[in-house]
Amino acid sequence: MLFLYNLILLFASQIVKILAVFSPKMKLFVNGRKEVFSIMQSKINPNDKTIWFHAASLGEYEQGLPVIEKIKVQYPNHKIVVTFFSPSGYEVRKNNTVADATVYLPLDTKSNAKKFIKAINPELVFFIKYEYWPNYLNELKKLQIKTYLISGIFREKQAFFKWYGGFYRNALKTFDYFFVQNDSSKKLIQSIGFNNVKVSGDTRFDRVVSILERDNSLDFIEQFQNNKTTIVIGSSWPKDENLLVNYINNASDDIKFIIAPHNIKSEQIQELKNSITKKTILFSDVQTRLIASLPENNVFIIDTIGILTKIYSYADIAYVGGGFGNPGVHNILEPATFGVPIVIGPNYSHFAEATALVHQEGCISISNQNELNDAFNLLINNEDERHEKGHICSTFVQMNKGATDIILKHICNN
């Protein structure tokens, strides 16, 4: 089976090169991997002690960040190596300050696995949430390098738990320990013979709790907000925006809207702006000239990345996008940590935190225009309801923090 896997991987690597000619994202995927070993050679010396973290994309990186930060404190003489599989993670965080070297993960061939692991010679390895690359894992096992899965999550539909999943189950045998998010994941992995597992919870809670300790002020948001009730719309997609724009266009001028779309391509931003009849300004406009008239606008479109978390701190109500697509809603924990009531679309069942907050009534799920209108109107007009739902959200985050400490305690004691 491993032979077939390697054959398929070789074929896929050639297909990706062809796709790179037509796709900017695939071009980043291919070209970025050409620089990996030269970057490693400049950043890591043969006698350096290193610890390696692998994240599929941006979400997994953010999830692992609390562990990375504490590992740096616990192991001050080690260098930190962070790898990404996806351009959407690497291109955003390639200049992070927490890691000593940040690169794409070379494709999972036997030769790449041997060369890369030899280049960094890690003492500890952490895979965040998922991604099980057999050749890398086999090489780590062969070299007896301790390897951990953190914030792992398992579901019955995964191949590990199917009759044909022997190849994938073998990949799991290479891990020294599994730190999983919930009891159902623990029971699932125990059902196929793995008892080296502990429920630590989700490190994302530690990540968002730490946000409260930082400076989240943005003068231009305060200027735009002008002490009016503000709805922050984060990571929205066109299916979200179709409903949201209808509401915005009919809303009172006493309500302010800040929209941070998931996709910030200029043509899509312009299309969104043109669909709104209220007075609207773009973040890029503020950047190119001083805008004294910010408070006169009703809608502020954030056509940049990296500041949404801070913007949530100004929200009276948050709408988090993605819930009309697949796999579903984006990160709701960032507005939740600020004690903001949240509205989302209907597709959230794959996300435990969203499911829990909908059940606890800190978060409202909507499926159509009328339900969106009702949810916003309730939260705008009923201040007690708004504060109660926000309190549920912030309490939920605080009650679920601590996963990082559980992981570090185990690692340092073993």
Image: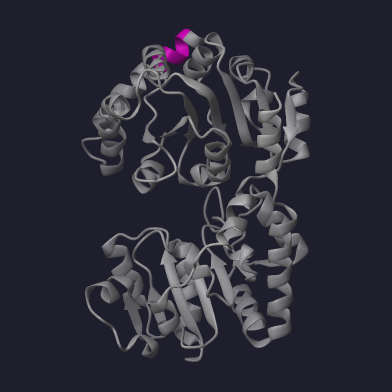
Q: Quadrant of the C terminus?
A: top right
- Pick the residue in front: 87 or 378: 87
Point 68% across, 71% down: residue: 390
In this view, which residue lies farthest toward the front?
77
Magenta-span inclusion, residue 276: no
- Pick the residue in front: 351 or 225: 225
Examine the image and state in which quarter residue 299 appears.
Answer: bottom left
- Tell me which segment is drawn in magenta: 3-8
Please provide percent x and percent y for residue 199: 74, 37
Left-right relation of 278 to 167:
left
Residue 332 can be seen in this image:
no
Dominant SS type (magenta):
helix
Please provide percent x and percent y for residue 342: 62, 68
- Pick the residue in front: 324 or 168: 168
Point 61% across, 27% down: residue: 148
Please provide percent x and percent y for residue 282: 32, 74
Left-right relation of 379 to 115:
right
Q: Is residue 63 above or below residue 160?
A: below
Point 59% across, 75% down: residue: 317
